[in-house]
Amino acid sequence: MTSANLMGEVLARVGGSGRAREFRVFECYARVVGEGFRARTQPERLAGTTLIVRVTSAALAHELTLLRSEILGRLNAELGPGTVAEIRTRVGALLKL
């Protein structure tokens, strides 16, 4: 069992299946976007099937929009079809976690 699977199970027990699903999407996003985007973007929340991503600049938001279908394809290949149907961006400073 991977740590992501274990964390998903723990979150499902304490915060419901929505939290576990959100955690899996965030973890998968970090893997599929690559290091360049990972350093300058941050998934904020999952609203239904829409992933809200904070980006550091408007130019980066545009770049992410151009790559949206490729990123969605990678996410849904790992998470299952329709798990994430849309990516929306918000420009702002990344939150320290």
Image (spheres, rainbow, N blue to C red):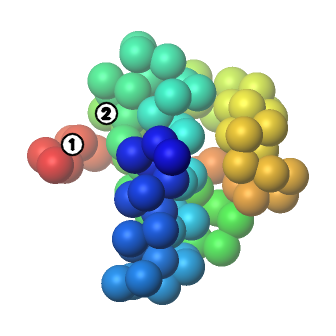
Res 40 → quadrant:
top left
What residue do we see at 80% from left, 51% from top?
Answer: 80
The spot of residue 7 in percent (x, y) is: 39, 59
Which residue is drawn at the image coordinates 74% and 58% (left, top)?
83
Q: Is residue 21 above or below residue 71?
A: below
What mark, if any, has residue 8 been given in the picture? none
User: Of helix, strand and loop, which one carries label 1?
Assistant: loop
Please give the name of the residue rendered at 44% of the width and 23% of the height, measured from the top-left corner: 37
Separation of residues labelled 1 and 2 (CA atoms): 6 Å
| Count of all numbered marks drawn on residues in the image | 2
Side of 78 relative to 17 (left or right): right
Q: Which amino acid does label 2 sit on?
A: Thr
Q: Mark 2 points at which residue?
A: 56
| Callout 1–callout 2 Cβ contact below 8 Å | yes
**Circle 1 sits on which residue?**
93
Q: Quadrant of residue 70?
A: top right
Q: What residue type is labelled 1?
A: Ala
Q: Image check: 40 left or right of 13?
A: left
Pick whichever, 69 or 61, lies toward us.
Answer: 69
Q: Where is residue 78 in the image (x, y as percent from the top left)?
A: 72, 40
Q: Position of residue 68 (x, y in %)?
A: 70, 34
Dot 1: few (<14), some (14–19), or many (≥20) neighbours within 10 Å? few
Q: Earlier in the sequence, mark 1 or mark 2?
A: 2
Q: Is mark 2 on a helix, strand or loop?
A: loop
